[in-house]
Image (spheres, coloured by chain):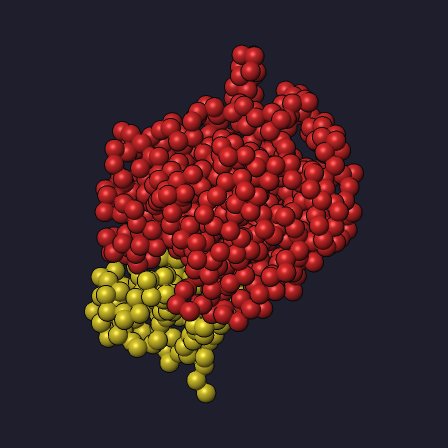
Chain colours: A yellow, B red
Amino acid sequence: MRLVLNIEECTGCKLCELACSAKNEGVFNPKKARLKIIDYYTDKGREITGKFCTLCKKCLEACPTEAITFNDEWLTVDDELCTGCGECVDVCPQGVIFLNDEDKSTICNFCEGNPYCVEWCPRECLKLEVAE
Amino acid sequence: MKSYMGKILRVDLSSGKVIEEKTKEEWLNKYYGQKGLGIRYLLEDIEPNINPLSSENEVILIPGIFAGTIVSSAGKLAIASKSPATGTIDDGSVGGSMGAEIKYAGYDAIIIKGKAEHLVYLYITPDKTEVRDAKFLKGKGTHQTDFMLKKELKDQEIKIISIGPAGENLVKIACITSELYRQQGRGGIAAVMGSKNLKAVAVKGWKDVNAPDISSFVKTVYEINKKNILIPDNSWTVSDGTLIFGDLMNDGGILPTRNFQTGVSPIYKKLHLEIVDKRKKGNKACFGCALACGNYIKINNVTLEGPEYETLNMAGCNCGIADLKAITQFNKDCDDLGLDTISVGNIIAYAMEMREKGIHDFGFSFGDVENYLKLPERIAYRKGVGNELAEGVKFLSEKYGGKEFAMQVKGLEVPSYDPRGSWGMGLAYATSDRGACHMRAFPITEEVIEKTVEPFTFEGKAKLVIDGQHYNSIKFSVGVCDLWALDLDLLAKLLNMATESNVTGEDLTKGGERIWNLGRIFNVMAGFRRKDDILPERFFTEPLPEGPAKGKVLPKKEFEKTLLEYYHLRGWDEEGIPFKKKLKELEVDEGVIKKFERYLKKGN
């Protein structure tokens, strides 16, 4: 399972980030989204990229308390075990893990197979790919 | 929790003092936000007759109620001040992400007054606000300013609004730029920033924006997006954007050409949207907008969001220029230098006609691409003829003559719609709160586009214009983009969800009227009366020479009669001064009514 973004079609509206934070954290705040659209201009033109969980599992490997587990489809954090040490945040190559207000690691779980970000993408350029 | 942040930030650049205060909830309930709230704070804080470029004037940045939430087309930032171009109240909005970012920084508004000793910028986060040295940005364009500030702050994603050299040099048509290609264009508020030595505002936020019941809020907005936003009726905003107006206006015979000498352009096909569309690279959205109207294009090596219809025509056909490459370069230069393309196009066309008529020679004629491309820089840095052009057509016509074809109202240059083929639009320009503006009422929709109303009559136009002004007033106060034509019942529904209030669409119409009166109070106190609610003589005396509106002028006597009818319907006296009874009926707050009464008693 993974998210794929057709970057050519992405408008940078960030509704995916807002949908994510609203559903999972109960607030509107792109800093609390489990994915990230980076969109800005440089002197060379527009730079736009999407950052998502790629299931590389570096967080899982780095977690000193084994709070992060993988169920063959997505990652899950056990809040009881998570100490908020931030190792996973530091090691995530996509930069999409953060510690929530309770200092618990917050990782994309594709909304357990029905990602809200995908549902909200107005251009339908963000999609969930499921391996056969 | 409501979608407000509950706090505003005040910055005094003279003393360097920064304070936070509570957002006045009673004003939010009456004036909603953005336009309405901006005018209310200005009426509280400044005397409307001050010099707009004095340190007392304020620049107020106001995100909308929905900014930072998931509501589409509602993330724009409103900026309000007293305009140096017109001396009226001025408020306008700019797209991009700054509206939401200010909310994420924790504020419902940022009010800036005073004057710094040298060029500075503001750096605002939820933790602190700093007034920082910006001497290294002196004379830099808005694009360089954006890049250099991001480098200095080591953050590519920080949100910045800035002024270019035009604003620094107090050019009356200077605009404020956000994310390179988005502008708060009209009325010269960038010059107010320049007069305060304020080069830029950089904001980084990370606070939550809330909604009382977020899951039902999100669900409702999702349904609204499906039913009211992502629908065929709105698809033009994404596919063509404002460029669609080119065909519509040329077909209606009201496409300003050669400084409004005609309304049909022989060269306009060269600037047709199909030609521009071929260069389109994609769409770029403002923060949280499902529509994404920003047309991101590349022509030769010039990257641009645009050109929008207004630029393409005012700096194109209206200047006798049909070279898309040149207009794109011109557009980018104006964005970078911080110039309002509507006013620049209008001023250049006026100067071209001055030469054509032998009144004054500014050194360039209609269609002179080479000189045309040099003008934005000259105007922004006030070099050579640019120094006078920077003051606008009202100033130029008072100095050199040619007032009858100086296409301005109250000092603001007329945008790209000729009212001789849309008489209601004439009344809309004359009565707009900031001079000739197409964003206050837009009878063109009924008169020219949908053709549901006869364009060559003033009958029923006072009401049509009033209704448009109320609709836009409330929409731009709650804070929804012009391109989403939502009805006010729907706006009320959203507002109730975000603020736990219980308003109806009807309440909002009344709110629009309340806010429109607030603006008029400001303008009356700034000295504006009936004599100022007038149009350039050309519209009254020179018939359009061709096209569907051939032979048409606005009959002046009828115009004057309609203006009085407009005042009467509004509950204003014959000078356009609101009666107290009307203000009471509209429930304008006592603070304003008392201030206004004191002013009127002084015998002004």
At 41% from the left and 64% from the top, the residue drawn is: B303
Residue toward you, B517 or B438: B438
Quadrant of residue B154 in the image?
bottom left
At 21% from the left and 69% from the top, the residue drawn is: A64
Residue toward you, B58 or B324: B324
- Count of residue discs: 0
Residue toward you, B23 or B369: B369
Please indicate, yes or no, whether residue B132 appears anywhere in the rendered image.
yes
Q: Position of residue B229 (x, y in %)?
A: 60, 59
Eyeballing the image, is B28 above or below B317? Answer: above
In the picture provided, is B219 more to the left or to the right than B159? right
Residue toward you, B138 or B511: B138
At 45% from the left and 81% from the top, the residue drawn is: A130
Q: Residue furthest front?
A: B358
At 25% from the left and 33% from the top, the residue drawn is: B117
Eyeballing the image, is B370 above or below B454? Answer: below
In the picture provided, is B210 more to the left or to the right than B237? left
In the picture provided, is A7 more to the left or to the right than B231? left
Q: Quadrant of the C terminus of chain B?
A: top right
Eyeballing the image, is A130 above or below B193? Answer: below
Q: Position of residue B541 (x, y in %)?
A: 70, 38
Please indicate, yes or no, whether residue B94 appears anywhere in the rendered image.
no
Q: Residue furthest bottom?
A: A132
Q: Position of residue B82 (x, y in %)?
A: 46, 32
Q: Residue furthest top?
A: B602
Q: Position of residue B225 (x, y in %)?
A: 58, 59
